[in-house]
């Protein structure tokens, strides 16, 4: 048995997530890394249905990022829930959400939340 993994790395979105009113008004740039995996018998894929369609993963991220929430943890959890609903054979996922230049008085940098889960099938 082998593990097959698909992911999107540091995909950039502009969104209005944040706890502070100015974040909801001004918005900010966010980066997402999302990886999903499953067990497979050998590596041979002939149909998109046999894979994790990274276009579908991107669409999930796009939908979640379009709906403002207070916390990055909520963003990660909503992506996780949609991944599990969309891919019945998912074995694990890993989600990282970065907020570029959070309103903390920093001159640069990012804040980050990560969520990982191994799912028993």
Image (cartoon, grey):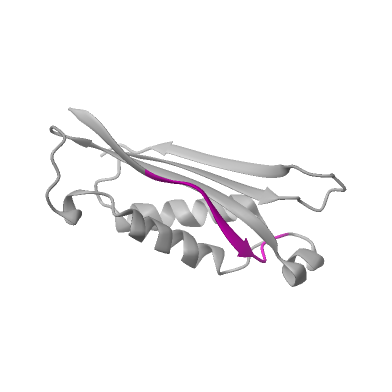
Give how far across and how far down residue 99 sits, in percent. 67, 51
Residue reaching furthest top?
1
Q: 90 above or below 3?
A: below
Give how far across and how far down residue 52 sits, in percent. 28, 50
Q: Is residue 50 left or right of residue 52?
A: left
Q: Residue at x 81, y 53 (%)?
A: 103
Residue 111 position by quadrant: top right
Q: How many marks?
A: 0
User: Which quadrant holds the N terminus?
Assistant: top left
Q: Is residue 2 left or right of residue 12?
A: left
Can residue 13 be found in the magenta stretch? Answer: yes
Residue reaching furthest right?
105
Q: Is residue 50 left or right of residue 61?
A: left
Q: Residue at x 47, y 55 (%)?
A: 79
Give how far across and how far down residue 77 sits, in percent. 51, 52
Q: 101 above or below 2?
A: below
Q: Residue at x 56, y 55 (%)?
A: 12
Residue 16 vs residue 84, the one in the foreground: 16
Residue 74 position by quadrant: bottom right
The magenta segment: 7-18
User: Which quadrant holds the C terminus?
Assistant: top left
Question: Please, what is the dominant secondary structure of the magenta stretch?
Answer: strand
Can residue 5 be found in the magenta stretch? Answer: no
Q: Residue at x 56, y 40 (%)?
A: 114
Residue reaching furthest bottom?
25
Give how far across and how far down residue 44 sits, in percent. 13, 39
């Amino acid at each position: 048995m082998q593990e097959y993994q698909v992911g999107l790395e540091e995909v950039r979105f502009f969104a209005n997530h944040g706890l502070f009113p100015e974040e909801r008004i001004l918005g900010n740039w966010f980066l997402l890394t999302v990886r999903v995996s499953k067990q497979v018998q050998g590596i041979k894929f002939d149909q998109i249905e046999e894979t994790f369609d990274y276009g579908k993963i991107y669409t999930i991220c796009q939908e979640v990022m379009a709906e403002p929430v207070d916390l990055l943890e909520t963003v990660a959890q909503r992506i996780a829930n949609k991944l599990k609903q969309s891919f019945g054979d998912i074995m694990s996922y890993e989600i990282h959400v970065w907020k570029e230049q959070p309103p903390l008085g920093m001159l640069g940098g990012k804040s980050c939340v990560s969520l990982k889960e191994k799912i028993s099938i």
